[in-house]
Image (spheres, helix red, strand yellow):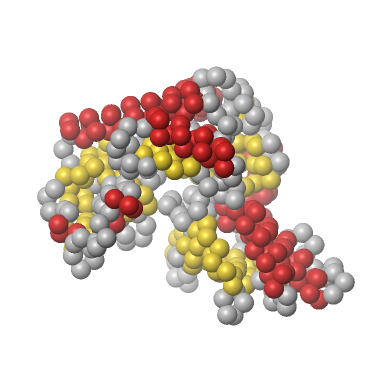
Amino acid sequence: MKQMIVHCTQHITRMALLEDGRLVEYAAERDQQQGLVGSYYKGRVMNVLPGMQAAFVDIGQKKNAFLYVDDVLHPHLEKQPEIRPSIETLLQPGQEIIVQVRKEPRGGKGARVTTHYTLPGRWMVYMPYAEYVGVSKKISRESERTRLKGIGERLRNKEEGVIMRTVSEDEPPEAVEGDLSFLRAQWDIITRRALETEAPALLHSDLSIVQRFIRDTFNPRMDELMIDSPKVVREAEAFLAEMAPEGYKPVGLYEGKESIFNTYGVQEQLYRSFNRKIILEGGATLIWDEAEALTVIDVNTAHYTGGASLEETVTSTNLLAAEEIGRLIRLRDTGGIIIVDFIDMELEEHRKMVIDRLESIITSDRTKTHILGWTRLGLLEMTRKKARHDSAGFAPVTCQCCGGTGKVGAWLE
């Protein structure tokens, strides 16, 4: 069973997702600092740089947004020219365009934006100009994939594209059609606002953190939603009534004296899961070190000694570590390059078992993760896309004493 636990304070909303009591996702959002990813802007092209095949677009933020040439071409790969054109033939300084934020600004970099527009709904992702129908790879039944693709082809207009989401599996055509009508109306509002406003201007904001998780991970008829704020309870119920008019479980209002995160065991799991050193069942450990674009995870047997032979001990430790790493990558929202230093195994079948265990865990992660395989040094290489940053609620700061970096844990209190 899934439980969404929402803890609201004066300035921060924190959301924890539990599966059978185990923490699998966590995010936090300041009230006045909602993320930009998914939002639409009417921007003005400021600079076109042929040497970088990119343009900088003023969207009204501190830093101009970065628009790469591939994000200006047709969203359908088969509709793109065989030879990539110069960015100068596509954009000119002063030109006004609608862009969507696909990656948050970070450090000294502005946001990454695109003209490959997407509007996610409950059952599908709507793409106004993509001209194709896709089906989530997580839907494995070929008959169901064919059914959903047929529904999408029947409902979309000529220039439109849709991707049927995993949760659309076995849903009736009427539900999917209602979702598409709602998303079309949203897109109409965005385009009308673009005609009525001058650049730079915000045209459409993404949903709040609670609404996003309800839309993307919540089953209204089966999962539990518990919130400790009457105001947010009312907002969640209004959103659920719009998203699931056929009915949903009532939203629970937590009124206990103790913190809702303590009552549901979230706080303790957060402290354990976000440490640099994570102790696994049996005494094995993970050492987790993160840089801006690279995360290195070291697996150690430490106090774990169970196993009839060294190979058996090492393999069982690595299998346990793979399962925990799959959960923590999703929970900590780790992105970029990920290198895992598993303990050396002699047999190829054991290395395959470790990859299979890791893949079985990351299938539940909504963010794309690619396992590239073992390097010549015996390290496991992975990559994971990350659009949002600091979603775990930690803000990196520079230490005034040593000049190093740390993590502020105040959001966890």
Residue drawn at x 57%, y 52% as measured from the top left: 330
In front: 373, or 316? 373
Say if 5 sits above or below 102 in the image: above
Q: With 97 as the anchor, is 114 left or right in this view?
A: right
Q: With 300 as the anchor, is 197 left or right in this view?
A: left
Residue 46 visible in the shown view: no
Residue drawn at x 32%, y 59% as measured from the top left: 109
Rendering coords of residue 199 (x, y %)? 18, 41
Say if 246 sits above or below 165 in the image: above
Residue drawn at x 67%, y 67% as measured from the top left: 352
Q: With 45 as the anchor, is 26 left or right in this view?
A: right
Outermost residue on the right side: it is 308
Outermost residue on the bottom side: it is 377
In front: 137, or 213? 137
Q: With 313 as the anchor, is 113 left or right in this view?
A: left
Rendering coords of residue 168 (x, y %)? 53, 34
Indicate the quadrant containing the N terminus: top left, top right, bottom left or bottom right: top right
Rendering coords of residue 153 (x, y %)? 40, 34
In front: 34, or 78? 78
Number of dots carrying numbers = 0
Residue drawn at x 57%, y 56% as measured from the top left: 329
Residue 199 visible in the shown view: yes
Say if 381 sits above or below 271 in the image: below
Rendering coords of residue 375 (x, y %)? 57, 76
